[in-house]
Image (spheres, rainbow, N blue to C red):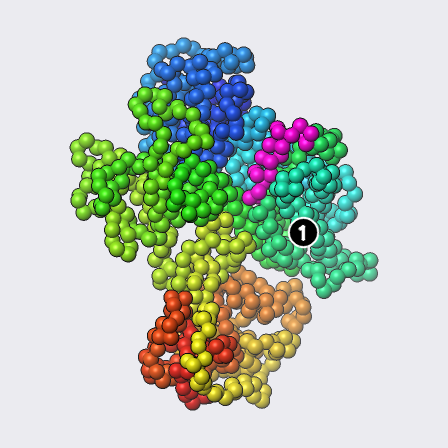
Amino acid sequence: MAELWKECMRWLIDCKVLPDDHRVTQPSAQVIDLALTLRDGLVLCRLASNLDSSAINLKDVSPRPQTSQFLCVKNIKLFLTACREHFGLTDRELFEPHMLYDLSRFGQVLITLSALSKTAQARSKNIAPFPIVSRGPVDDSIYKNLDEVADHHFPPNHTGRLDSAYDRLRIHFDHTGAVYTSDREEDVYEDICYITFKQTELHEDVVYRRQLDIRASFAEAYYERIEDIYDVICSYSKKNEIPSVTQTPLNKRDHCMKELVETENSYVMALRMLKQHFMKPLSDVLPVAKRDVIFLKIKDLIEIHTGFYSQLCQACQDEADAISPPGSLKHTRANSFDVPSRISDVFLRWKEKFVVYGDFIENLTRAQETIDDLCASEPSIKIEIAKCEMAAEQGKFRLRDLLTVPMQRVLKYHLLLDQLIKNTSSDHDDYDGLRNAHSAFLDLNEYLNEVKRDSDDLQAVQDILLNIEGDNIQAHGGACDPKKFGRHVKEGELKVLFHDNPPKKNRYIFVFDKVLLICKASRVSGTLLFSFLIRMTDGEQYVCKDLLQLSDYKVDETPKDGSKKGDGKGNWTWSWHLVQRVDNTAITMYAKTEQERKHWLAALKGLVERMNPAEARRAGHCFSVATTTPGTNCKFCRLLMKGLVYQGYQCSVCSIVVHKDCLEKLTLYCGRPEPPPRREESLISSSVSLPPPRPLNGPPLPSPRTPLGVEEDLHGYDWFQGRMSRPEATQRLSAKYVPPGTFMVRLSMDRPDIAISVKDEERVRHMRVAIKDEAGFPIGTQDRRYYLANAHFFRSMKELIEWYKDHSLCESFVELDITLQRTYFDILNSVTEVTSNYSYEPGDDGGGDDVKSNVLCLKAGAQVSVLDKKYDNQGWWLVHAQHQTGYFPKSHLSQKPSVA
């Protein structure tokens, strides 16, 4: 009887609701894998629809339930209602929703599916029911307590989310029936853009890596279908005339370049096909709002990839010219100053523009659903869309399938770059650049994956909020603004005790990134089985009684009343406190079991810590969790902020944005804040007159010979201080008015070396810049490469300096965790040592909290370094004193002797 679940799995495959290669078919699969596959109710709803198209209204199905118990149970209830009303199953043959969602009695789920397999509707499909051989009663003990197995194999993360659940099978529901979105979309993708090279082994390797890497990007089944769509379109465009990079590829690298350029050309043609055969003909047919949703960002993508393709061809041609024999015909570059000469430069230059794919991917499901809705409700529009599909390629491609191609294409670039790197020698001029480009597009992929994940999460949040009423919900934005709530994290039934309003009450709790909702169920409750099967309607389901901002609370997991342990009965006695940070008022929450308490605490403590991370308090900035604009990069690591909501932390003083993992790596020095509000003229009438800064450059000193052209290349940059000894650089940067992160570039006095001197939190550090002869040419030619360590190579000192302004020097020196933040020249031209004549506290002049946030409180006699006088006309100087940076009234300061 233990193998009953495998017979059920085979029946589901025969019913075409699971693919033949689903993970539950693997030799290592267990019953828990099938249970998790069915847990969100999507497969079950599709099964009912396949057996009887009238059994379920697919518009009632929540297509993206994520980990929401509310939405998963809603889908399960729809299936159970269909089993009872359309398939005639009896109450004894049905399971209760919690038996599946809680994984507590999966054996009863198998009994229901077995009974369904024997109905007239199922037999009419000529599919053998299960079990094939009649057996005795199911030994339900075998399938009990799968929730414990799930906890063991799929433990919740720090937020309490079961992340593996996101990667479970995803189903798409359209109005012609529930179908997988994987197979057909994959075929179209391959036909449009993929080129096969039989003369090398490249194709097999690329396909293998694509199967491994792309399936990991989003939901596995979904992307198998997209891949096919992509390949279909690529093969389709193959027949068109394409400017070749090399007419006769000589090696694997040539084939990689040929594949890269030709598939890009095919993709550009596919985008133009969308515009020519769909956007233009349908512009007068579709309502403007619907048209804008369906074709969102298509025009932008055409413009971007036309330019990208042009520069890609140019870069490949430049490389071909560089290795062509002397005397051969060279290609003339149209824009020798604007177009990069290396393939890696093209990718790095265009990466920022490719962030627009985030908007496209976020909108993709909405666009496809809009097409489905229009075709279902407007027969005339359905006919016009069909005409366009026929005109494009005799109906080979559906419009909704073509819209998936851009998403698949952008996820291919890192694979194409990976193949190019594999077939590029390490001493090639562009080898390091290609590795940087590959890393950049991996970063882009992660960004797009998180955008898709957040988009699905926010849709689930919106679905949840539509079923919750309450003035506090609407005041917080409600379903119209799910981003204010954040991602869905956890939900479930608890008992809640407000200490100022006893006794304990039964409540349903929804937890999101920022808020916790305490709700009262408005549905009829009862003990009969079909109290669980009340149909979901547009009416009220929950009423929000309280909305808590999680940043205002802390979690106390050891209640003072000692009720952590069970009271003998074991139910609803496993408790903890949510404590208000301001007045210490507490709310006690009770879980049914110790295991549930463990999960709730993991979720709540993770979120509360995320709102107020310890790293933010140690970093010297005023960080709080923030939602950033698309394309924002982390100030420390320079990688994209991933997702759509609450991606990282922003400093309220200097406005920098960082990932959570980068918080503790930042320097303690907080950058320039915004000025406070303008003060009254009566308070700033007095000013300090300071002499201009001393000039920096004296007469040149005799020096050893430096590499040809190096010194000339450095002049003109404010970070270059000429020839200077190590002790002199140390003395200058050690001045107390010089903040950490200040640096200079100098030439050594006794050696022909370039050195970077930088001040960190402890002392002044000195680093020698190495110069590499990249291609065997004499030092002094254009093939020179500058570097601090073998991790990164640069074609100029300017490139090196700009890189380490955004990336920590710990990449090259483990103990030096700082970036190059400001030049010594800037400090000397802005820093003046002064003394505060009077004590001052923010608010003395009537300013509010917005003034206090970036103004220093100093006593009379404090030693102050003036960093900036930009807002002199408003009466404020930016100063550094007592390990703090902020604004201070200039009328309270007097000048010290000028810095020598």
656 drawn magenta: no
Depth order, front residue of 850/601 = 850
Q: Which residue is mark 1?
A: 304
Residue 775 location, x and y as percent?
Answer: 65, 63
Image position of 478 (left or right of 370):
left
Viewport quadrant of the N terminus? top left
Depth order, front residue of 161/700 = 161
Query: Which secondary structure dominates the residues rendered in magenta?
Result: helix
376 drawn magenta: yes
Image position of 737 (left or right of 860):
right
Using the rendered image of the protein, determine whether residue 90 is visible from the camera's viewpoint.
yes
The relative height of residue 642 versus residue 545 in the rendered view (above or below) is below
Residue 288 location, x and y as percent?
Answer: 66, 42
- Residue at image point 55% right, 82% down: 723
Using the rendered image of the protein, determine whether residue 262 is visible from the camera's viewpoint.
no
Residue 825 location, x and y as percent?
Answer: 52, 79
Residue 49 location, x and y as percent?
Answer: 52, 22
Q: Which span is picked out in magenta?
A: 361-382
Depth order, front residue of 546/695 = 546
- Residue at image point 63% right, 39% down: 290
The relative height of residue 505 versus residue 805 in the rendered view (above or below) is above
Depth order, front residue of 797/47 = 47
* Mark count: 1
Image position of 386 (left or right of 564):
right
